[in-house]
Image (tube, rainbow, N blue to C red):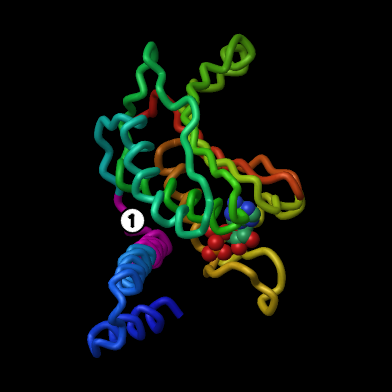
Amino acid sequence: APIASVRLMAENLERGKISEPAKQGEYFRFIVQECRRLSSLIENVLDFSRIEQGRKQYEFEPTNLVALVETTVKLMEPYAKEKGVKLETSNIQHPTSNTELCVDGRAIQQALVNLIDNAVKHSSKGETVTVGLEINNGGDMATINHQPSTINLSVADHGPGIPAAEQEKIFERFYRLGSELRRETQGVGIGLSIVKHIAAAHGGRVRVESEVGKGSRFIIELPMQRSA
Ligand code: ADP
């Protein structure tokens, strides 16, 4: 569907059928936006097949996660705006803590894009999606339980939420909620399985906190010291 509508719009522009400058601008913006989404979909599909074949490689290098979150939010802003959803960051500046971590920046960005894309997709007009970065030193209990300190990237929405029974399954490949016939959202069901793979490749994990009717919060937990 996105390819068909991009083609239709480009053809109409090419044939000079759209003369009004405002309408032209609207068409151009739509084309750019849809091409971005298609690129990200193709990247997901390619990565998915690399993961399936065990050929996905990661390149780890010191990366400032605050800057990465900011860039990613900027990248997704036009998409959120188009859907009438407000995209904001919350508490991502941590002046006294080190937010630099050895990660594959592109992969972490892709994981965040997938989560933000889902959050916006499942939000209604006028709702807010919040992206956060929390440093979890875990406190005393974590030290006692030998839990590592983590940097947590989170994406929260006020959408329909996910029933408890489905909260594990949504991370499986091709798993989508509801029946195939009355789907309200587009997708193929690989986004979250890729996020899960990316988190695991960093020695971390992804989990969801969600309540039906209230919304969802996805959290990527990245350990601060990665064992080699
Ligand atoms: P896709 O979005 O292509 O269906 P995903 O793997 O990204 O695939 O998501 C799997 C399923 O999890 C979705 O079909 C949807 O039912 C559910 N889901 C994901 N994110 C959210 C969210 N923020 N709110 C509600 N449901 C969600």
Residue reaching furthest front?
Answer: 20
Residue drawn at x 38%, y 37% as measured from the top left: 69
Judged from the image, the quadrant occupied by ligand 1 is bottom right
Asked if 227 appears above or below 117 in the picture, the reply is: above
Task: Magenta stretch: give its range.
Answer: 38-57
Q: Position of residue 107 (x, y in %)?
A: 35, 47
Position of residue 44 in the picture relative to residue 83 (left or right): left
Asked if 21 appears above or below 206 in the picture, the reply is: below
Identified by mark 1, the residue type is: Lys
Residue drawn at x 33%, y 69% as measured from the top left: 22
Which is nearer the eye, 76 or 43? 76
Q: Which residue is mark 1?
A: 56
Classify mark 1: helix, strand or loop.
loop
Position of residue 165 in the picture relative to residue 130 (left or right): right
Quadrant in the picture for the C terminus: top left
Residue drawn at x 53%, y 39% as measured from the top left: 130
Is residue 120 in sight in this rendering? yes
Is residue 49 in sight in this rendering? no
Residue 127 colored in magenta in the image = no
Q: Position of residue 142 (x, y in %)?
A: 59, 17
Residue 45 colored in magenta in the image = yes
Which is nearer the eye, 177 or 4? 4
Q: Position of residue 88 (x, y in %)?
A: 48, 38
